[in-house]
Each structure stands twice: as structure tokens, then as C-alpha cells.
Amino acid sequence: MIRFETRNAPPRALTVGVPILSALVALALASIPLAFAGANIPTAYAEMIKGVFGSKFAFSEMLTRATPLIFTGLAAALAFRAKLWNIGAEGQLYLGALAAVAIGAGAIDVPAFVLVPLIIVFGAAAGAAGMAVPTLLKTRFGADEVVTTLLLNFIILIFVQMMLEGALKDPMSMGWPQSAPILDQGMLPQLMDRMRIHSGLIMALVAAGIAQFMLARSVWGFRLRAVGENAAAARHAGIGVNRSLMSVAIVSGGLAGLAGVSEVAGLKGYLTADLSPGFGYTGIVVAMLAGLSPVGVVISALFIASVFVGADSMSRAMGVSSYLADLVVSMSLLCVLIGGFFARFRIVRTISEVA
Amino acid sequence: MLRLARLNPMENLKILSLNALSKRFGSVVANDAVDLDLHRGEVLALLGENGAGKTTLMNMLFGHYLPDSGSIDVLKDGVMTPLQLGHPQAALAAGIGMVHQHFTLALNLTTFDNVVLGSEPLFSWRRDRAGARAKLQGIMKQSGLEAPLDVPVGQLSVGERQRVEILKALYRDARILVLDEPTAVLTPQEADTLFENVATMTKNGLAVIFISHKLREVLAFSNRIAVLRHGQKVGEIATKDADERVIARMMVGADTPITPRENMAPGAPILTLKDINVRGRSKRDGLSDASFSVHSHEILGVAGVSGNGQSALAGLVSGLIRPDSGTLSVDGNEISRPDPLAMINVGVGRIPEDRHHDGIVGAMTVAENMVIERLNDTDVQTRGLLNRDSIQASAERLTKEYDVRGPGSDAAARLLSGGNIQKLILARVFDQNPRLILANQPTRGLDMGAAAEVGRRLLEARKRGAGVLLISEDLDEILGLADRIMVIHDGHLSEVTTRDREEIGLSMAGEHA
């Protein structure tokens, strides 16, 4: 007979080892569909690695792809720590992007040192508002935030499409549903010549550092952890549970909004309805893989971005579908969930009963 | 009070023997080679502190756990035959019945249906209701257990429900009945009725194992006492040779110091409730027109059977519940919008009933749990950042001062044992020198040493000038600590002037004597 016993405290090696192992197992499992697609497996993996580390350009592309994932991963990780299930980072990302073009695409003409901070603040505020509303519905009326934030994603996306066909449509776009470009002085500075990598990455890394520090060392982080781990005891101890939830909702939504800002004002320059290939949802995987640790989010975002960029380049080189990347990302989430089970429980074999 | 006739067990016929039963859970030895015999018609009291191994032993007897070693013999057709271990069905067939502390009844079914449920064949065209009814009525007559047969169990009182549980076991021809803390949910009068019934049943040959930690009952109603400590049977004694002190020493392994209670004149009122009404979850579990004061240098005990408004009262004083009407004031100042922080800030220390659920955040460290109620204090934070050194230092001091034992102050609080979790909460509360202490079931589930420590701290606070509101279902605890006693029943509070158990018991049952 096999039984599962709860571990008292998961050993440190397991809490770090399980996500790493899960990621590797997910990568290894990818060889099965690769074999079905008829690819030479060692070559395929070599192409994948080359696609990320093969050149300065490849590496900078990976970092560019990781930037929004760090933001959305942080958004999910902080909210989840408080057991506030923000599934709406995708929508909040679009709200942030929408605010960025609404302010930055010619509405006001001010120098860069005013316009860039304005865009950042308004983008974050729009994302924060996008999470504050479902949180208010939760604390006031008990509406399940999983449902409301998920459904808001679609509502927001349709709203963005409406704006792109209407008020924010670029008159010079020859009919394409896209916004006017952000003014030059509104764009985030580039980090390297002739590369797409931009200072949104620096913002994301700083945000991760601040989040890590605040979570461990501030009273705000203390309250957030207490509310997430045992809301009843937190309430009994005089912690305002609803206030804590609202404050983490604002931070989480704000971070997701910054993902949108950085994509629009750092990379694309204008807003289209296909700005995000699901960065908001992938952020949930990033956060789970990171064990909801802000510093871990950075590492897991880099891993997942590598998988995406590497698989892209492999699929171009070998003629295999690039959907493989989605497969690896999904499998790594499954692996980390299974791995988390083994980190929390130990398996005990008991001698079957003697009659 | 009724006393059991100390008859010699009929013929002294052995019907059950547990032989060297052992059970380990990981590194914990729950039972270590425990021997126990049971004779026809006797009441054997099984005593022991929490975690002494009483429940594990009974679970092995009932087939829920498989022993690591040892055997069980049951009398069958005149010979002792080994019982198949690890099979509840075998235990049932051998005539072993168990009444758990938490009843396993279907509230929407009648007494009759609850009793016959599961004893009828699953696939059968017709039920032999008349036969079953006749058998059940026979049992009721013989045992003296009375309960209305055709009323849904949900409408019965707690005492009646317990009788239904016993009837269920007897209906399945139990010859050995295990009662797990049967009086925990009963008023003193209901408990007396139970013991009268037990006396009748044992006269008819039933053997009873009676699990309890109330020494008074054990001494009054058993023939023999077996004491477990740390998984081992440390003693067995005929009840007529025992007294409270002897048994307590057997249970704990040493004499427990009892803090003498000094007489003290109460001072000014600290907590005052005036015409408070709270709607509870059910009709009886609220508060109606509650008006009273707790004074300085005073312990006010609130006695009552659980579910009569205690949680509303505790929630109110903790700041978790706002009254629907009436006023609550501390030191003469009305608390207009009570919430937990407001109560903490006016000096109310709270010891919650469910210490795991409301008392600690198990995943956070012992040190963090020590400061969780005073995050705004200047030694805890500076401009929003935690002062980790000072938090750590105060945790070190408090764990030493209050003897909180565990893997250390930076380990997760859930790793502490129940008694040490309570010590953590005591440290957090008492270190703030509260004006008023709400102690809700403060010793529930604690061993005697830890319980004595709680009592000592409460008396110490009273001496210092604090007021204590002590809510407890343990009448002995209230009689031992309280200066004044109120009884809560159906959400009504009434002060009793007597210290007589019988009279207080009548008030607890709602009968104003």
C-alpha cells in the first residue's frame, strides 16, 4: 500500500529543485512530438539553443520577449500570494497599453522627461483600475474574482477593438485597425543599437527587486502574506483583510498595465488588437513555475521566453510547427504542479496488512 | 448525585483482551505494548491527557487502524477468539460498538430510520419494519434509553441524540460499548441520566469502555480505571481505591501545582455591554438583551452548553461581530465601530476558541505570529518596514518567558504542538498587559500542565488589575477560576449566585430553578 504523508517543511533543495526539474522534464517531453514531426531530435535541440544563445541578436530577442512576462508574472505572483486569483492580467495589459497610446500618441505634446513618466503612471493606473473593479465586487458582494477577471479580459479586448476602429484609430493607417504611433519623445529608450531590446526590461527587473523586498521586509508584505495564508487569523489579529486585498489588487493590476506600456512604448510604438500573444495568461505559468517568488519570476520568465524564441527559430530552421513552444510551456506548468505535489508530500510505502 | 452501585462484575467473566498492542506513526509511538482486559458488566474508564494514545487504542479495537504488533481476543461462544485486525466489519460482528464524541447521525431521518440504517439488507423487496421496531422497543425498555422514534433526529436535543447513537450500537447487538468523551456536550443533568442508563445496561451484562478526562465523573461512574501516558499503560486501579490526586499524578507523572486563588475586591468596570442584540447563525446562537460589566480584579465566567450564543459573545468582544443594537464600552468609552484593531487598541487581549483557525497564521514564523497584532507599533516597524532585529529579539524573549517549545522562533508556527500554539497566543496577549482578557475555551484540548499554566496567567492578570471574561464549557474550570458566574442559554445571559453544580446545570439547560 502506498500512502502520502505531509512533509512538515519542504526542504530547501526541493523548493528550488522541483521547478528546475519540471522545466527540464517538460523540455525533454517535447522530444516526443518532435519525433512525430520527423525531426532529428539532437539537431532540433541544438537549433533551439542556438536560437537563444547563438548570437547577440538572438539573446536580445529573448530578453525582449521576457520583459512583458516578468511584469505579468509579478502581477500573478503577488496577487496569488494573497490568494487573490487575478486571471485578468491579459486585460489589464491592454488597458495599460490603451492608456499609453491615449496619452502618448499626440494628445499632449510635452518633452520626454514629462511624457515618459506620464505614460508609465497612466498605464499602470489603467491596469490597476482594471483589477480594482473585480476586487471591489469580490469584497463587497462576494463575486468570484476568477470568473470576473477572466471574463473582463474579453470585454476589455472588445473595448480595445472598438477604440481602434473609432476614437483612437490612426487616420494615416489606410484603414487598418491600429492606433496612431506614440510620439518619439514618448518612447522608452532603447538599450542597444539596432536591437529591439528596450528599457522596459530595466523597469521589470527593478519591479521584481522591489516586490521581493516589500514582500519580505515591509508591513505591507507581512499583511499580504498573512491574508493569503490565513484570512480568518489575519482578520482576528486586526489586519484589514479587504484593504490588503485592494492594495495588492492595485499593485498587481498596475504591474500588468506596465506590461502593456512597455510593449507599446518600448517595442511596437502603436497599439493593435494583437499586441499580446497571451502574455497575461503565460504570466500565470511564469508565476507558478517561480513558486510565487518575485525573484523566481525573473528566472522563470527568462526560461519561458527562451522556449518561445528558441522554438520559433528551430521551427524556421527545421520546418516544424512553432506551436511546440506552447506545448513546452503548458507541459512545464503541468510538471511543476505534479512536482509541487511531491515537494509537499512524501510517499510512504507501508507493508500490506497481515491477516 | 447518582452513584453507580459498585457491584462486583457478574462472574468476573472476561470478554475482551487487548494484548501488547503497539502502533507507531512515523517516529511517534502512539501505543506501546498496551494490555487491557474488559469484563462482563463492568465500566472501565480509560484516562489520559491529550495525545496519550486513547483514541489510537480505540481505533485499533474498532478496526480503523491496523496495529503494528499485538492481538485482540474477544469472547465468542464461550472461548476467547482472536479478532481479525484492521476490519471494522469484524469488530461490529464481534459486538463492539462505539459512540463518537461527534455524532454520526442523519439529521433529516427519524430516530427509527437512523438506528436501522445500514443494518438492513441493501437489496430487498420489503423492509421488516414491524420486526425492527419491536426489537428496538425491546432494547429501549431494557436499557431505559428513551427517545421519540418517529421524530427527525434534527429536532432532538443533544442528550437525546446521544441516546440514539447508543441505541444504534445496541441494535447491532453490541456487547462492548465504547463511549468517547460522552459528557462533553451534555449538561450535568443530562450526564446523570446517561450514567443511570449505563448502570442499567451494565446490569444486563454490557461492558463499557468510558473515555474521559473529567476525573470527577470517572471516580463516580466506573468500576476500574486504566491510565495511559505517552502511549503506555502506566497504571490500573480499582475505582474504590482511587482518589483525584492519585489519578492526576498517574496521568501527568507528577503533581500539578495549583495556583491558590486569592480573594480580591473588584474595582471599576472595564468592559460594559448594554442591551446588546446580535443575530446569530441560528435562532439560539445569537445574543439577546445582553447587559453586564466585567470589573477590574475580576474573572467573570460564562458557563453554558456550546452553541448557545458563546460565539456571538466572543465575536462581539473580539471585534469580529458588530452588534445589531446596544452599546459596548471599554473603560467608560463607547466603542462606536467595533473591529478587531479597535478592540486591541483599547487594551482587549483575545484568546480565540479555535487557535489554529483564528489564532495563528500557520505558514508564518513564530516570531511573526508574536507581533501580528501590533504591526503599527514603533518597535515593530519604521516607516512601513519591519524591524527584523527587534521582532526577533522580542520573540526570543517571549518564547523563553512563556516556555514556547518548538523548532525555534523562525520556524513556521504550524509546526508547534497545540499546547505550544496556545502558549504563543498567551505570550502575545499577556505581554501587552491588556486591560481586559477574553479567554474563549482557553484550555480546550490542552494537557493538565498547559491548562494549569493558562489558569495561572489568568489569575496573575486579575491580580494586576485586569478584567477577565472567561467563556468555557467546562464547569469545573469556571468554578475554579471565576469570581462571578453567568450562564448562557439560547442567547440569554443570566447571572447565577449559587456555586452549586446542580443549580448551575439547571440554568444551563434553560430551566430557571
Image: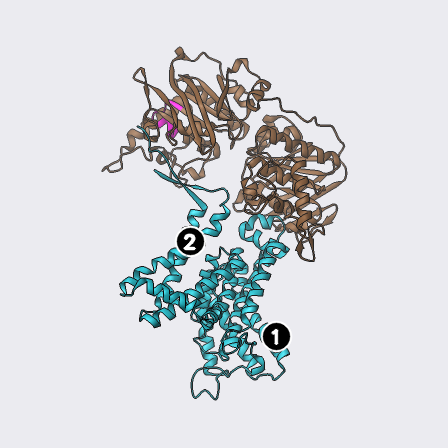
Secondary structure at badge 2 equals: helix
Quarter occupied by the C terminus of chain B: top right
Segment colored magenta: B166-176
Front one among B153 and A289? A289
Nearer to us: label 1 or label 2: 2
Q: In this view, does A4 lie above or below A69?
A: above
Q: Same chain, marks 1 and 2?
A: yes
Chain of the residue under label 1 = A
Q: In the current view of this chain or complex, which residue is farthest to the left? A: B125
Residue at (44%, 39%) from the top-left corner?
A: B154
- Is the residue under label 2 in contact with that under label 1 (CB below 8 Å)? no
Q: Where in the figure is residue B82, as x and y percent of width and height?
A: 32, 21
Quarter occupied by the N terminus of chain B: top right
Q: Circle 1 is placed at which residue position?
A: A117
Q: Where in the figure is residue B161, as x and y percent of width and height?
A: 44, 33
Q: Which chain is brown?
A: B
Q: Where in the figure is residue A167, as x and y percent of width and height?
A: 50, 83
Q: In the rendered picture, chain A carries what hue? A: cyan
Q: Where in the figure is residue B16, as x and y percent of width and height?
A: 38, 19
Residue B334 visible to an observer of this rendering = yes
